[in-house]
Image (cartoon, rainbow, N blue to C red):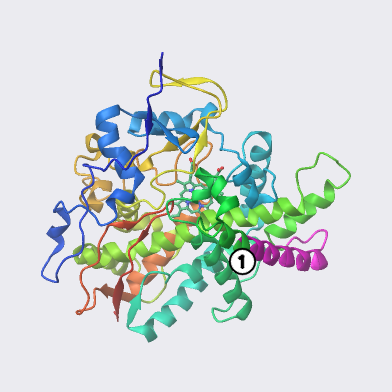
Amino acid sequence: MTEVTRKEAVGAQSSHCQKWLGGTKKNNEKSQDRNFPGRYSNQHIHLTMSGSWLEKYGPVVGLLLGSAPLIAVSGPHAVLEVLRRDEFHGRPDSEEIRERSFNKRLGILLTDGPFWVEHRRFTIKHLKDFGFGKKSAEAVILEETEQLMIEMKEMKVVQVSGLFNIPSVNVLWSMIAGTRYAHDDADFKLLLHKLNSFFRSGSPAGNLATIFPVLKKIAPELCGHKKKMEALNELTNFFRKTIHEHKLMLEENNPRDFMDVYLQQMEAEKADDNSTFTEEGLIVLCLDLFSAGAESLSNALSFCLLYMVLHPRVQEAVQKEVDTVIGRSRRPSLEDRTRLPYVEATISEISRINPIAPITLPHTSLRDTELCGYTIKENTTILVNIWSVLHDREHWSDPEVFRPERFLDADGKFVKDERLIPFGVGKRVCLGEILAKDMLFLMFTNLMQEFTFRTPEEDPYPTTDALPGFITAPAPFRVQVTER
Ligand code: HEM
């Protein structure tokens, strides 16, 4: 077996990147196929990995980021192998990473081993059973959708960036703490502000302090560390306050939401010194669910509107299917999903062509092992390039083309494709996959029933070139909203 190639990550640029960048109003849908290199292409590590690195070095590339060795994995074979093999299911651990969790390993996102298994299982089970208090997930999402539609009717021209933040945070908060806020509620605005400062205060390419820890000591402002820690502190206090309010109202046999169930588990295990259920653990779990869920949901919905304004014929076809199957006298519900194959195909195609998480959260190897003929040492950090699977030319044939029909068979039925993995796959698969799919379906279908979206006359066509970051987003764009 050979050693992993070690290369410095020095700004190699993708030749594979074929994205369309803006243009004049005269551009029509066909312009999407033109090979304009995107404005942010050289800031997207997944494009570099899928392009020049894959071509030159193959699916497994060794890197040194500062002093930290890691491997970057691209291409369907290697990516699916990493995601499916148990020994690659670890998460990196460092002093810097633990700073977000009381200098311990807590939560789900960045833990592994028995602690992670126990907390992941607990969270999945109870979010399903109690997550939405007395209301179903569907009811909460539909309430948020109605509220958003009322606001949109008043706006006419809407800035899409940030449009879905409030509904996304509200849905998650209902799930965790059983409360759905009015959109202008002062406490809610505070929560949104704290979340925003926490997520936005790091550099989009990742906090520099993780790569060069010394920066944290000598120039905290420079690497965004100080601001991020302040925001984290405020967020932690907000969650702590809510937990204490829950403690006061806790009824033994009547848990109202996820926090209550967790608190009951803490109570049940309080005599056990080895119990892993602690108040700090619950705070970090809240932080994890917001970190992983809020921006992803919001950005995924923004991408839906983006592709609808860029592809009016697809928008029309979606509306036609909604009108035919559901009509205009009632709202679409989750039960309608199987009867709306074109809608399902369109959402699938949007999440394939511009995935929110083009690279998964970092994995690590839990023991010495091998991958594609390379020796991988225990504790090696692994960047897993999902984008390269979603854009694999051999499988999709024209991956850069937006074509929902690729998910339909000759009879127009929706066909699942096992290579459609925007939520990852294997034991580390996204914990919020079902919730996210439900929310995307419900919000998208309801919006399509009620409105037509276009680019305002005075605006340029928006770009499909996503903003860089571990969670990507469309570059800011506006839509004109017309009631149907
Ligand atoms: C469109 C929306 C979403 C997308 C595309 C998405 C995608 C992903 C991906 C790719 C991963 C990494 C898998 C890996 O590391 O191998 C992940 C992990 C995770 N996601 Fe999501 N996600 C979305 C929404 C959500 C929501 C709404 C929640 C919260 C309810 C959530 C909670 C999580 C958690 C907790 C993890 C870590 C799982 C673990 O490490 O065991 N996600 N997600």
Rendered location of residue 127, percent (x, y): 62, 54
Residue 27 seen by the camera: yes
As displayed, is residue 482 above or below residue 20? below
At 29% across and 34% down in the image, what residue appears?
A: 53
Packing grade of label 1 (10 A; few <14, some 14-19, many >=20) is some
* Residue nearest the observer in this picture, 125 or 37: 37
The magenta span reads: 232-255
* Residue nearest the observer in this picture, 429 or 145: 429
Rendered location of residue 294, percent (x, y): 51, 61
* Residue nearest the observer in this picture, 395 or 362: 362
Query: For the residue marked with disc 1, what is the amino acid?
Result: Lys
Q: Quadrant of the C terminus?
A: bottom left
SS assignment at label 1: loop
Rendered location of residue 300, percent (x, y): 40, 59
At 33% across and 70% down in the image, what residue appears?
A: 448
Point out the residue furthest to the bottom here.
154
Point out the residue furthest to the top here.
1
Left or right: where does residue 255 sit relative to residue 192?
right
Left or right: where does residue 267 sit relative to residue 56?
right
Main SS, magenta residues = helix
Question: Is residue 230 located in the magenta-colored stretch of the structure?
Answer: no
Residue 136 seen by the camera: no
The answer to whether mark 1 is within 8 Å of ligand 1 is: no
Residue tagged 1: 135
Q: Quadrant of the N terminus?
A: top left
Left or right: where does residue 411 sit relative to residue 298?
left
